[in-house]
Image: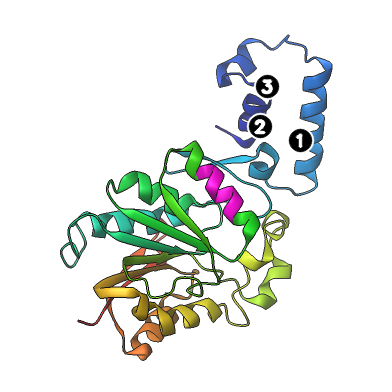
């Protein structure tokens, strides 16, 4: 479906075919106002998902607003890789342990990763953290909408987790270089800066995770990180420098870009 078709079918609550079969249809005042307002916002550069208040991720419908990033196809690869390893089909390697497994997501935003993992890994216990209260409200709504059991905590990465240990830690942290943000497309600049800005070289959050993640993983636990288009090698280097991790795999996205780094704690 094209963007225009998606916009009109959602606003008018109709099927795609109706847009073409009922060409003589006249909009009432309420519908006309809805369409005019949506088109104005889109022309101003607001992302379609914010206008509709929803996005789709791995078959799930999710609520989104300007306090969270819009879920992207690249992040589906992160989730698919996590499910593959948790289910015992990791390459190389075998499942870390039997269910139930403890999963932690750092920086959950809309909750798309945590909710999908909770739905896809029956018996797992998923915890998701974010520093933004508004993001946590959005994630909680998405968990309720999709009947997913996710424990949500307000935390700056690991700060509120105490001594807890997890089998898997997964994250799509902010990784845009600070100096690149002003040059992003208008739609991207509408998304929350704190969820985009990864510092001068885009690696600030990876450094923090590399230093502390092993302390929150069980023996042989997994760390899965989504990376920017040119960052996978640097992220692997940070994990290796920590001397706590061994790299298991780097997964490429649909364009052949190294997108997900998988590491495990040294046993």
Q: Is residue 193 visible?
A: yes
User: Residue, x 24% and y 55% (percent of image)?
Assistant: 100
**Where does label 3 land, which residue?**
12
* Residue 257 against residue 210 in the figure, above or below: above
The secondary structure that dominates the magenta segment is helix
- The image position of residue 235, as x and y in percent, is 42, 79
Q: State the residue position of label 1.
A: 38
The answer to whether residue 36 is above or below residue 221 is above
Q: In x, y percent, where is residue 174? A: 56, 69
- The quarter of the rendered structure image containing the N terminus is top right
Specify the segment rendered in magenta: 136-142
Instruction: Judge from the rendering whether residue 17 lies leftward or rightward of residue 74; answer left or right.
Output: right
Residue sitting nearer the eye, 88 or 219 = 219
- Residue 203: which numbered mark, if any? none
Q: Earlier in the sequence, mark 2 or mark 3?
A: 2
Instruction: Give yes or no for contact between labels 2 and 1 (Cβ–Cβ under 8 Å).
Output: yes
């Amino acid at each position: 479906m094209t963007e225009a078709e998606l916009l009109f079918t959602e606003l008018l609550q109709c099927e795609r075919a109706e847009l073409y079969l009922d060409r003589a249809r006249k909009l009432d005042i309420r519908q006309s106002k809805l369409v005019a307002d949506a088109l104005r916002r889109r022309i101003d550069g607001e992302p379609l998902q914010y206008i509709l208040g929803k996005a789709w991720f791995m078959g799930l419908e999710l609520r989104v607003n300007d306090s969270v990033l819009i879920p992207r196809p690249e992040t589906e690869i992160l989730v698919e890789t996590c499910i593959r390893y948790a289910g015992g089909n990791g390459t190389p390697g075998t499942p870390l342990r039997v269910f139930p497994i403890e999963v932690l997501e750092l920086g959950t935003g809309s909750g798309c990763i945590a909710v999908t993992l909770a739905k896809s890994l029956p018996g797992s216990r998923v915890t998701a953290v974010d520093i933004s209260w508004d993001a946590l409200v959005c994630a909680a709504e998405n968990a309720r909408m999709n009947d997913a059991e996710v424990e949500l905590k307000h935390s700056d990465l690991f700060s509120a987790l105490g001594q807890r240990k997890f089998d898997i830690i997964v994250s799509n942290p902010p990784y845009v270089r600070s100096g690149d943000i002003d040059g992003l497309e208008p739609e991207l600049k509408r998304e929350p800066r704190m969820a985009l800005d990864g510092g001068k070289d885009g690696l600030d959050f990876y450094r923090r995770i590399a230093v502390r993640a092993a302390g929150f993983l069980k023996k042989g636990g997994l760390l899965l990180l989504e990376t920017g288009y040119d960052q996978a090698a640097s992220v692997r280097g940070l994990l290796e420098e920590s001397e706590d991790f061994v790299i298991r795999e780097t997964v490429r996205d649909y364009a052949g870009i190294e997108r997900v780094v998988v590491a495990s704690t040294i046993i």
